[in-house]
Amino acid sequence: MAVILETIKNLKGYKLHIVKTAKFKTSTIVWKMKTPLTSENVTKRALLPYVLQSSSKAYESTTKLRSYLDELYGANLNVDVSKKGEFQIISFSLEIANEKFLSDPAPLLKKGMELIAAILVKPLTENGAFDKATVEKEKRTLKQRIQAVYDDKMRYSNYRLVQEMCKGEPYALHVNGEIDDIPQINPENLYEYYKQAFAEDEMDLYIIGDVNEEEVQSIADHLLQFEDRVPVQLKTAQTVSREEQIVKDQEDVKQGKLNIGYRTNVLYGDQDYYALQVFNGIFGGFSHSKLFINVREKNSLAYYVASRLESHKGLMMVMSGIEFENFELAVQIIREQMEAMTAGDFTEKEVEQTKAVIENQMLETLDTSRGIVEVLYHNVVSGQNVSLDDWLQGMSTTTKEEIVDVAKKIQLDTVYFLTGLEADK
């Protein structure tokens, strides 16, 4: 039996995804829209969902919106802007009580879907422009969000690694855009971009819960209708092999941030994607990994060390916090762990342990409705059709030889080090 049963319907201008499950006492509605990252629009797009959330015709202020959410038994609304591969994705998600568990017969799912629709397609506008006060308020908040990355040196060093590693590639753009672009955004040009996004984006609506599929489809079709479009599919270009580069920045920091970027040359849905997942777990993904044991535990070089994959761009990033003087030694030991992986210097026990952790992690993700959406959305981003059963099967049958083979594909690209002002550059 399938781990998740997803029904997909083509509606007007978007796809409706329904996961009927009795696992939750809530219904979750998630609207996602994606488009390729571009320097022209990245900042406008980062601002747009917050403006839509803050003022619609029905709920002109955040106060009115919050008051209505309270009426809906404390429904929870969130907006988010994220980056997967070279796409920038806007998400609106609403978690609302399932009326089956309440004495009140009010159709909460329908009301929740009406609320999402009101926010998406009936914004507060005047003379072809968004509400000026709302736009100015959200511009100030966006500036703070961008600034927060510079203030958090762990996030900043990861951003700088990506900037250097992917120079000239859309992936180098920060998901929240650029502070310098914010002053040029006004209620008129943001509204023009809003119309463009809803005319061109690939759009998906997810409904998760113990719902009636025909009823959900009928409500969605009534509330949300857009022009048909052919969504842009990107084929992520693999960068030509180049010399490894070392980049160092000096700032007033007390602890060095060492970030290393690799090109995996493997994308989500590729045949060796499953082996890459297991490779990453053994290399640096978990507390039993080579990086954790050798860099942190045995040599006491790092306050933290881990690796993570960006599966839609074909990258692996190692992140660690070290003393300034330990830079050379830490890089050397990380290199040695990669060499050990390509040489097959790991045991079957490590392979099985890693598979078990990955499977548990996946099943934990599926314990939340939003987690289910994130897992299913990988197929939309990648243009693939990998079922969760295929994913679990592919990962569980991965062999040690396949892990070694995928390790040999991985190329070190950039070593980035954020060091202190007193340290030698």
Image (cartoon, rainbow, N blue to C red):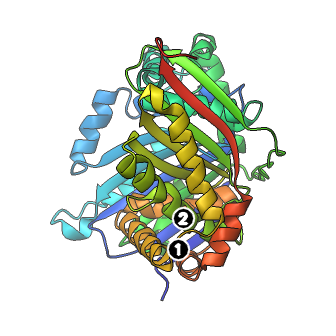
> Are the residues tagged 2 and 1 within 8 Å (C-beta)?
yes
Indicate the secondary structure of the residue bearing disc 1: strand
* Image position, residue 8 (x, y; %): 59, 70
Label 2 CA crowd tier, 10 Å (few <14, some 14–19, many 20+): some
Residue 6 - label: 1
User: Is residue 269 visible to us here?
Assistant: no
Q: Nearer the viewer, mark 2 or mark 1?
A: 2
Viewer-side residue, 68 vs 413: 413
User: Is residue 268 visible to us here?
Assistant: yes
* Image position, residue 241 (x, y; %): 82, 45
Give the residue pinned by disc 2: 376
* Image position, residue 127 (x, y; %): 60, 18
Q: CA distance from mark 2 to mark 1?
A: 9 Å
Say what amino acid the circle numbered 2 marks: Leu
The structure residue drawn at horizontal position 50% and vertical position 45%, both measured from the top left corner, is 91
Indicate the secondary structure of the residue bearing disc 2: helix
The structure residue drawn at horizontal position 73% and vertical position 30%, both measured from the top left corner, is 167
Indicate whether 379 appears above or below 312. below
Q: Residue furthest right?
A: 240
Q: Quadrant of residue 182?
A: top right
* Image position, residue 4 (x, y; %): 47, 76
Q: Residue furthest bottom?
A: 1
User: In the rendered view, does 390 fall on the left or right side of 196?
Assistant: left
